[in-house]
Amino acid sequence: MAFWGKKNKENNPDTREERKKVGPIRKLWQKFRNIDWKNPVNRWKLLFVSLIGCIVVFGGGYGVLSLTNSPTFCASCHEMAPEYSTYTASAHNQISCVQCHIKPGFTNMITHKMKSMKEVYYHVTGVPKQIVQTEEEAVSNDNCLQCHSKNRLVTASGDLKVNHKQHIEKDIPCVTCHAGVVHAKIAGRGINVEEARGEWTKENAEKLIEKKYLQPNMGTCIDCHDKVNNGEEPWKDVAYIVPPNPEELEKKLEENNQETVKDTSAEATAEGEKTEAASLEHEQKTQDIILQAIGKQKKNVKISMECKTCHKQTVIPKSHKKVNWNQNHGETAVQQLDKCMNCHQDSKWVREIPKEDIISLLKMGNQKIKYTPNMTLAKDQARTNNFCAACHADRPDGHGESNQWLTGHASKAKTSDQKAECFVCHDQDKPKADTNAAKAPKDVYCKYCHRTGFKDDKN
């Protein structure tokens, strides 16, 4: 029987009996047309049925929207445990997830719900190894401005001078700086992966949420300002704002590996040299920015890179104002390295976030490790920290001319303390390629010339 009571004349005999057969929908339509609508009782019945239908449809729809908009609905999927745990431990735990993750407006709400059906598909067919916000769903300024004013000039700490209105008028997304305000950048840190989801509870989240990840990353400010000074507008690329998708990175890595296999040894060597050159360029660029920040190098730029441009409090410690501080701060650095690193830590100047191990973080918690004076640690910092290398990489004035220094430096390296100063920049033995020790800023080592050794190798 056809749905509407019709038959295909080519495939079915056209008999009077079969022509009389009609489908169920047509029967209902015929009954509806045969109703006496002049009768007020029938009209009231229609109104009552229509009212009940609207309540069921719209009430049910509202109930579904309310359910799917609640944070508890997000928490019902185990793969969202890291995101939900950090949310409950954050300062934004009194607002719903959708207030940030869906643009204001009913149309945007419905559109987002339709797109979110793919999340249900992923949940049923195969949960992603890591939840990462996509470029299409980056938190917009419209969401933030529902609660926050764009006229703020300072941060809550009162130290920073940030003209929020000027940033917003340039269409710079708030999440460019405030990406970790709720979830503490767990995707970038790599601690919301599949194997770590069982460790995420509210208690553990409080241990894993560190202040440095909740606050704006100074490296982001520096990187963005530097790009602006070079004529770029990096925030216009959404990929600059959201964390990289690990699945896409793996795909690119596989493609690169396949291309590498095809390379000849000469091409591989050239690629290695290119990578090393890029690394050296990056270090030089970092040192250049540091010198601008501390005011030792002036450049005609759109945005000043000096610390005082953004910070209200850039007081130089009294100890730094001593005579010959630059030449005599080594002992202080050994004794108070932890305090030195509060300002002179180049990792704070880098936008990229290093990957972390969740188990190690949970064992450590938020406890601060007490620093014990350590000459080796101080030396490694002097070698690897770009802040230190900005000065240590230059030839000291006390070395004079090379030809004179070669024959006259023995008197400067008699005691253990004097030699320790030398070993900040130089190694005694030829460094091994497979060692994990910090690389010396200079490739000149003592036994390059003193091949027969020294009278007292203990020093």
Image (spheres, rainbow, N blue to C red):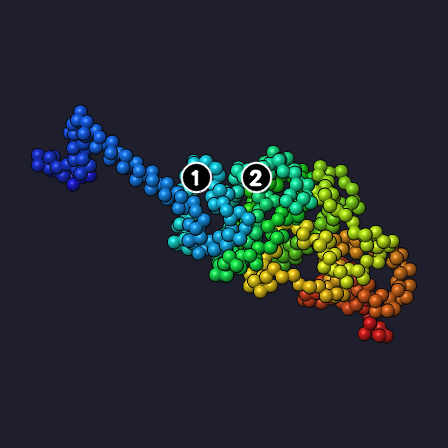
From where the camera sits, is residue 170 visible?
Answer: no
The residues tagged by marks 2 and 1 sit, at their Cα atoms, a distance apart of 21 Å
Q: Which residue is drawn at 57% across and 52% down?
A: 184
Q: Residues within 10 Å of mark 1 (few under 14, many from 20)?
A: some
- x and y, in percent, of residue 118 in the image: 41, 47
Quadrant of residue 239 within the rendered picture: top right
Horizontal side of residue 365 vs 447, given as left or right = left
For mark 2, give the secondary structure.
Answer: loop
Q: Residue at x 34, y 38 (%)?
A: 58
Q: What residue type is labelled 1?
A: Met
**Vertical placement of 56 versus 366: above or below?**
above
Please name whichever residue, 151 or 437, is drawn nearer the observer in this view of the structure: 151
Quarter of the image with the C terminus in it: bottom right
Q: Name the residue under label 2.
A: 148
Horizontal side of residue 73 vs 432, given as left or right = left
Mark 2 against mark 1, which lies toward the viewer? 2
Q: What residue type is labelled 2?
A: His
Quadrant of residue 8 within the rendered picture: top left
Please name whichever residue, 358 or 278, is drawn nearer the observer in this view of the structure: 358
Q: How crowded is mark 2: few (under 14 residues within 10 Å), some or many (20 or more)?
A: few
Q: Residue at x 16, y 41 (%)?
A: 1
Quadrant of residue 227 within the rendered picture: top right
From where the camera sits, is residue 110 visible?
Answer: yes
- x and y, in percent, of residue 16 in the image: 8, 34
Q: Name the residue under label 1.
A: 109
